[in-house]
Amino acid sequence: MHSASRAALMAAFLAVVAAPLAQAADVTPAQAKALEAQVRVWIQDMLGPDVRVADRPVEAAAEGDHFRLSLPLRVTRGFKPDTIMLTGSATQISGGRWGVADLQIPSPSSFTLDVPATNKAPPKPGQNAPEPPIPVDYTVSAGSQESEGVYDPSFATASTLTTSLQNLRIVATSVLTEQLTTVRHLAGTNKIQPSGADRVDLMTDGTMEGYALSANMGSGQPVEVAAEKIRATGEVTALSRDRIATMIPALMRIIGSGTPGALKPGIKAPAASLSDGSDVARVLLQALQDLASELTLQETIDGLTVHYGPYGGTASQLRIGLGVKSADGLLQAHFDLGVDNLILPDQSLGDMAGLLPRNISLHPVLSGIPTQYFMELLAVQGKVKKAGPPLEYAFLFSRGGVSAGLDSFAFDIGGTRVAGTGTVMMVSPPLMTGQGQVTATNFDELVQRVNGIPKLAGALPGLLFAKGVGRTVDNRLVWDITCIDNRLLVNGTDLSAMMGGARR
């Protein structure tokens, strides 16, 4: 239960208030009831007609010059709902905006969730029924909770929300596990920035300090994870509010029907549906085509320690990142993975322990896929031809080809530093070209280490061959790699010919 996420949800509910209230005068009980009704109408419009909304999804009370809001968070287990009440205050300020403050989760809070059992597959004819879900009891407590924000329902100015929470503690108990999660300090900043007609930029920045998790799993092996600091940032650029309004009802209908197939009888298709207006999944795909122009996510974990039974490891830093962008109708994506000072002291590898990589950095990229054709291809169902790939795959190469590769990579192994870059261009499924470069520093040290380990004797000829075809630049070995006309060349040496490959 992330306090920043719950707070953002509370702030979003305030966007429905259209009628300005007297800024200086005290609010009245009648205005509180009107606010509740407006919130309910807004939620119902967002979720669609086939989802029942509570009579009072948000409860408002007049309290001086502001509203005291209560958001019941109903966690349902079977027919016995557990209700947690998130509270806060809202005050109208200049320009039709709202000031949001004092967002609080009751501490402690307790509730029960049913989680799926290990056996997720449906039973076959003649077999027993699948395992029932397992109830997990949660208790959440926290120290001081602070929040402050401004929300502009018109999206004409920026909306912001900052939250801070001390000493978060979550206890989860079931027949299979006992788990304790603690966070010394959790803080977050969320911002909605207008970026044109019907478009906004979403930015989030959250940190956790002093994170620790301990659990006793059903296998009997204790698990412990700790991190000095975790930071996660994200940004969505030019997000379409209109597209979101189309997607939410479609998603709710998929959840309600349990299948991404046709709409339920009597339910009107969303306005943005395709020509046949009968496939909710295709509605979602169409909405995704122009949902946003760019998405970036980045997470950094400092001082990571992981233990599972007798095994464990540490890293001074772990980095994970993702980026997706649509520019000029072409899809671009990248992924980042980095590990610094990885140590696995409990692995019984003997001499081979010195060959484990300590520092790893990867940056794979993908570009050149037409966004519209890609989304249409995902919408195609059951149209694969037996003779080969469906005709729709040709769309993926209609704008000059698809490029994939490693923008950069590097790792340390056995005292040797290996780094490089490479790109492959595919103009059709069987035709591709590519080029790249790989460098290695202190390569001889790696050869000596491998030569001293009898179990790796089979790898030594390959290392010696790689050294032979490499060219020396200062203290580095360099391999320039080219792939063209079904040939693989390394520093001008045709390896495909040496391995018996046929030339075109």
Image: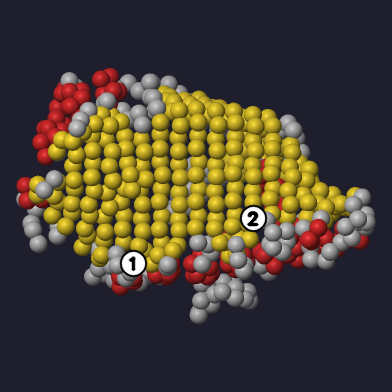
Q: Looking at the picture, tell me which residue is in the foreground, 126 or 86.
A: 86
The kind of residue tagged 1 is Leu
Instruction: Give the image quarter of residue 48.
Output: bottom right
Residue shown at the point (15%, 35%) measured from the top left: 472
Amino acid type of disc 2?
Answer: Ile
Q: Is residue 425 above or below residue 163?
A: below
Which residue, as the protein is rendered here, is positioned at the far front? Answer: 474
Residue 279: % across, % down: 51, 72
Colour style of the rendered protein structure: secondary structure
**Residue 376: horizontal and vertical position, in percent?**
42, 70
For the C terminus, give its image quadrant. Answer: bottom left
Q: Position of residue 157 (x, y in %)?
A: 69, 59
**Which residue is drawn at the image coordinates 44% and 53% (left, top)?**
124
Relative to 474, say whether 126 is above or below. below
Task: From the top left corner, tell me how far across and down residue 334 is, in percent.
Answer: 40, 51
Say whether disc 2 or disc 1 marks the residue closer to the N-terminus: 2
Label 2 with label 1: CB-CB less than 8 Å: no
Number of on-image labels: 2
Residue that badge 1 annotates: 396
Q: CA distance from mark 2 to mark 1?
A: 34 Å
The answer to whether 162 appears left or right of 444 in the picture is right
Residue position for label 2: 192
Left or right side of 263 for 80: right
Q: Residues within 10 Å of mark 1 (few under 14, many from 20)?
A: many
Tell me what residue is drawn at x 28 percent, y 46 percent. Answer: 421
Q: Nearer the viewer, residue 13 or 163?
A: 163
Determine the residue positioned at 33% across, 48% down: 407
Q: Which mark is residue 55?
A: none
